[in-house]
């Protein structure tokens, strides 16, 4: 039978071992994260809009109470891009209702129910601010997604169909995934084909 001093020594050795394992795990995780960001900055993936929409299907930023029973509400840290002077607010675009159904293959399909205030913007040139999600590699983009909210992860962009716009540019935009930008373009209302894209801006240029 081990005496008390032996037990104490064993506990000390185990504690030291676990501490070292934890430190090594943190170092490995840190190196992996740094490598991920480096790769993201220097070698952007060549994404298609189909792949981008698959990422977007993850859903919108949560705004539900943290604990409804306790009455505690989690303050939403996600803020949409600030509306530019004379521009369209994301709160208006988000007011469109998403009507969903399940098709024969079990997939959830959706189409928009635009309010009158949004319908009045169809075919007009508008300004909207947001964050770029490139759809291709290169220093410039002529087709990309304009996101209402900043990305929370370099690999997943959580947005509902009312929280992004497909941008078709007549003037190329410099690729910039970190800073908000202003886009001026002709707004088209889409999505009746259940494509998952409710908004498109054509003939777009930096605002």
Image: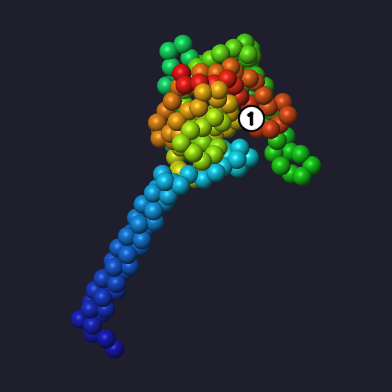
Q: Quadrant of residue 191?
A: top right
Residue 153 visible in rendering: yes
Q: Which residue is mark 1?
A: 197
Q: Nearer the viewer, residue 114 or 179?
A: 179
* Image-based side of 34 in relation to 157, left or right: left
Residue drawn at 20 percent across, 81 percent down: 5
Residue 145 visible in rendering: no
* Image-based side of 140 in relation to 32, left or right: right
Residue drawn at 48 percent across, 33 percent down: 140
Residue drawn at 40 percent across, 35 percent down: 178
Position of 76 relative to 104 (above/below): above
| Disc 1 secondary structure class | loop
Q: Nearer the viewer, residue 141 or 71?
A: 141
For the N terminus, the image quarter is bottom left
View extreme (right): residue: 104
x then y, percent, for residue 43: 46, 47
x then y, percent, for residue 133: 50, 35
Q: Quadrant of residue 136?
A: top right
View extreme (bottom): residue: 1
Position of 18 relative to 190 (above/below): below
x then y, percent, for residue 167: 56, 27
x then y, percent, for residue 64: 50, 34
């Amino acid at each position: 039978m081990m005496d008390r001093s032996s037990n104490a020594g064993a506990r000390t050795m185990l504690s030291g071992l676990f501490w070292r394992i934890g430190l090594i795990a943190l170092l490995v995780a840190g190196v992996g994260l740094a490598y991920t960001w480096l790769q993201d900055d220097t070698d952007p993936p060549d994404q298609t809009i189909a792949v981008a929409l698959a990422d977007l299907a993850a859903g919108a930023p949560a705004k539900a109470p943290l604990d409804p029973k306790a009455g505690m509400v989690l303050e939403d840290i996600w803020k949409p891009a600030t509306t530019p002077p004379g521009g369209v607010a994301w709160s208006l675009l988000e007011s469109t209702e998403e009507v969903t159904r399940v098709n024969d293959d079990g997939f959830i399909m959706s189409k928009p129910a635009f309010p009158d205030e949004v319908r009045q913007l169809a075919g007009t040139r508008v300004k909207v601010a947001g964050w770029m999600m490139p759809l291709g590699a290169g220093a410039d983009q002529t087709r990309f997604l304009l996101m209402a909210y900043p990305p929370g992860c370099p690999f997943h962009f959580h947005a509902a169909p009312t929280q992004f716009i497909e941008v078709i540019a007549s003037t190329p935009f410099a690729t910039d995934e970190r800073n908000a930008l202003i886009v001026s373009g002709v707004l088209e209302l889409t999505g009746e084909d259940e494509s998952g894209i409710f908004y498109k801006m054509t003939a777009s240029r930096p605002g």
